[in-house]
Amino acid sequence: MSDKVNFGDELVSPEEKTRRVGAVFSSVARRYDLMNDLMSGGMHRLWKERFVARVKPRSGEQILDMAGGTGDVAFRMVQRGAHVTVADINPDMLAVGRKRAERRSLEHLSWKVENAEGLSFADATFDAYTIVFGIRNVTDIPAALREAHRVLKRGGRFYCMEFSSSDWPGFSKLYDLWASNAIPRIGKAVAHDEDSYRYLVESIRRFPRPGAFKAMLSDADFVRAAAEPMLGGLVTIHSGWKI
Ligand code: SAM
């Protein structure tokens, strides 16, 4: 059983998980940005602004936005002068992102199909590595963290934003009700895909708590691993440095 991993609440083989995560995002790609607004009541925009303010992208920096999907976080970072490589395992998500970037005439962006667990980039390529609402979908998280460390330059920064189960008792109940009932229903009505949104909710519930994720960052040799909770711990920004 030890070779099984969770796909939401189901136990499947690692290969099956990667394949099914791929199917989820291919299925939601076209409606992904609209769904983010509906599911979070627009809040994801504020979380991403806050995240990018933490990353502090600078002119001339090379940033890897891993699991970058349709480019939402990358766009905010190029607007601050960095060059951003948007990498994602799913070509359908990247295709939507490229079209959005063209419509906005954004420059300083590269797009690349990559699996976070084994990157094609040379050692010490990037000044910062970002991964937003992506890492909980990755099958082998420790492998992805080791790769993040490898492709960062010395002094490079790692930033991850991810959902976490809330520690506020009242809020956590309310959130659970919203997540388990409303999100799959919105998914059914808007994206005609209830199952994919049920997976998203289950994967959020299963992601390691901030303390456990901090320990995984330290295991991958990041120093000063930190977790900064927002909104009663609903969302957490994790950071670490490569020395
Ligand atoms: N970062 C974007 C954002 O916040 O809008 C997209 C987040 S979306 C919820 C998760 C993304 O992770 C999807 O685009 C999916 O294809 C990607 N993903 C899942 N597993 C991956 C892997 N092993 N390597 C790279 N990307 C992966």
Image (cartoon, rainbow, N blue to C red):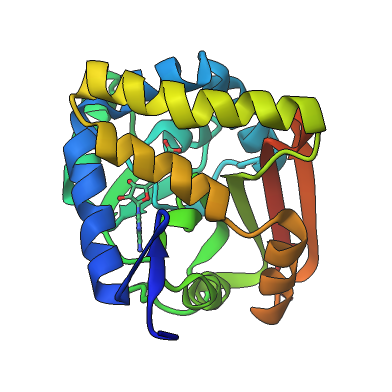
| Residue at 78 percent of width and 25 percent of height | 170
Number of residue marks? 0
| Residue at 27 percent of width and 49 percent of height | 111
Name which quarter of the figure residue 38 lies in.
Answer: top left
| Residue at 40 percent of width and 72 percent of height | 5
Q: Residue lying farthest bottom?
A: 2
Name which quarter of the figure residue 138 lies in.
Answer: bottom left
Could you say which is closer to the camera, residue 140 or residue 204?
A: 204
Could you say which is closer to the camera, residue 108 or residue 117?
A: 117
Residue 100: horizontal and vertical position, in percent? 25, 25
Name which quarter of the figure residue 220 lies in.
Answer: bottom right
Could you say which is closer to the camera, residue 19 or residue 218?
A: 19
Residue 105 as seen in the image, left or right of residue 37: left
Task: Kindly tell me whether residue 216 is visible in this rendering.
Answer: yes
Q: As displayed, is residue 92 above or below residue 7?
A: above
Q: As displayed, is residue 168 above or below residue 156?
A: above
Residue 193: horizontal and vertical position, in percent? 21, 31
In which quadrant will I find the N terminus? bottom left
In which quadrant will I find the C terminus? bottom right
Residue 220 as seen in the image, left or right of residue 130: right
| Residue at 63 percent of width and 53 percent of height | 159
Q: As displayed, is residue 90 above or below residue 196?
A: below
Task: Kindly tell me whether residue 117 is visible in this rendering.
Answer: no
Residue 180: horizontal and vertical position, in percent? 47, 32
